[in-house]
Amino acid sequence: MYAVEMNHLSKIYTGGKTAVADMSLMLEQGEVFGFLGPNGAGKTTTVKVLNGMLQSSEGKCMVFGEDPAREPEKVHAVSGVMTEHAQMYNHLTGLQNLIFYGAMFGIGEEESRKRARELLKQLELADAAGQKLSAYSTGMRQRLSIARALMHRPKILFLDEPTSGLDPESAYNVNQMILALAKEQGMTVFLCTHQLRYAQEICTRYGLIDEGKLLTVGTLEELRDGVSSGMSVQIRADRVPDALEDALRKRAVSDRCRNTEQTAGIREFTFEAASEEEIPHIVSQIVESGGKVYHVSASRPSLEDIYFALTAERRQQ
Ligand SMILES: Nc1ncnc2c1ncn2[C@@H]1O[C@H](COP(=O)(O)OP(=O)(O)OP(=O)(O)O)[C@@H](O)[C@H]1O
Ligand SMILES: [Mg+2]
């Protein structure tokens, strides 16, 4: 059984806006899936349809074999959702909020209290357990809503921008927690985010969406194979032969890493190489013509590089 199954899913809002367009996607159990895309791409809408918070306009979807359009309560039993504006109660404390949601899921008070304390500790909110939500900062609220989504030990966790309001340390901790939930408890995670560096650290597979359409799906390696370059190489050197300099300039990676002239005749080039084998060849050409090489580094495209390459490609279409 798939954790998530979408078959030609579409959502058109009243008023005519197509937020999700003919989306088909399967998620295996235990995947940490990064759902990426610019503002307004349709990420939150997709999460809401998958959780029965919105009705789809066309197509079908299932979450652990349950249909959110027909039996949303069955989906709620297996799914934890943290959306952008989670509804919680300002006049209740953090602990009371969690116990309240525990009760909604049919968890007894004693067990709810125990579970809530455990989650508050994991999310570094133990000291704020007795504080009213109205006194919580944005980051504290965000962490509390993650705790809320985990109260009933869901099989799948939907996280919509879980780290956007968090400071770097809290964001790191939340990411480590997501990773641990997936690795140790086999939880499936559906993560909507713009924070590509964090996504690259924890996701096992990605989907890129724009204007409601799924542009590409795959692991980082698969996505890398889909963009033009094998490798991005950076060289800093002086006295580079003219012909080589011209050739490297033509292969500049992108406008974001243009070749830059440095002081005292030292130049920096960032260019695309087809393979690692090319690097020593280029270095020896510089050295043999009397030049000095100060720095050489090579890296494969990051998730961010791929995201920019694919969205730029789309804008040009
Ligand atoms: N209730 C609504 N009624 C009409 N249009 C809506 C509604 N909610 C969202 N939309 C539109 O649907 C599109 C997709 O919105 P959605 O919130 O799903 O995007 P998103 O990918 O989550 O964006 P963000 O990264 O900004 O959170 C947008 O064009 C948005 O304006
Ligand atoms: Mg959103």
Image (spheres, rainbow, N blue to C red):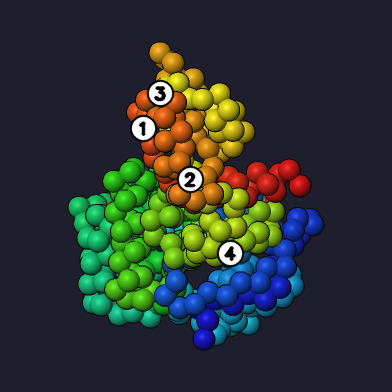
**Amino acid on which the number 2 mark rests in the picture:** Glu
Real-space CA distance between mark 4 and mark 2, rounded to the nearest whole angstrom: 30 Å
Residue at horizontal 49 percent and vertical 30 percent from the top: 269
Residue 278: give its label: 2
Real-space CA distance between mark 4 and mark 3, rounded to the nearest whole angstrom: 47 Å
The residue tagged with tag 3: helix, strand or loop?
loop
- Dot 1 and dot 3 residues touching (CB under 8 Å): no
Mark closer to the chain start, 4 or 2: 4
Front position among marks 3 and 2 = 3
Residue at horizontal 71 percent and vertical 73 percent from the top: 8
> How many numbered markers are drawn?
4
Does the numbered disc 3 mark a residue whose Cβ is under 8 Å from ligand 1? Answer: no
- Dot 1 and dot 4 residues touching (CB under 8 Å): no
Real-space CA distance between mark 1 and mark 3, rounded to the nearest whole angstrom: 16 Å
Q: Say which residue label 3 marks.
A: 290
Residue 126 appears anywhere in the view: yes
Front position among marks 4 and 2 = 2
- Dot 3 and dot 2 residues touching (CB under 8 Å): no
Mark closer to the chain start, 1 or 4: 4
Q: Left of 128 or right of it: where is 76? A: right
Q: Position of residue 301 (x, y in %)?
A: 49, 49
Mark closer to the chain start, 3 or 2: 2
Mark closer to the chain start, 1 or 3: 3
The residue tagged with tag 2: helix, strand or loop?
helix
**Amino acid on which the number 3 mark rests in the picture:** Gly
Quick check: 170 above or below 66? Answer: above
Q: Say which residue label 4 marks.
A: 217
Residue 295: give its label: 1
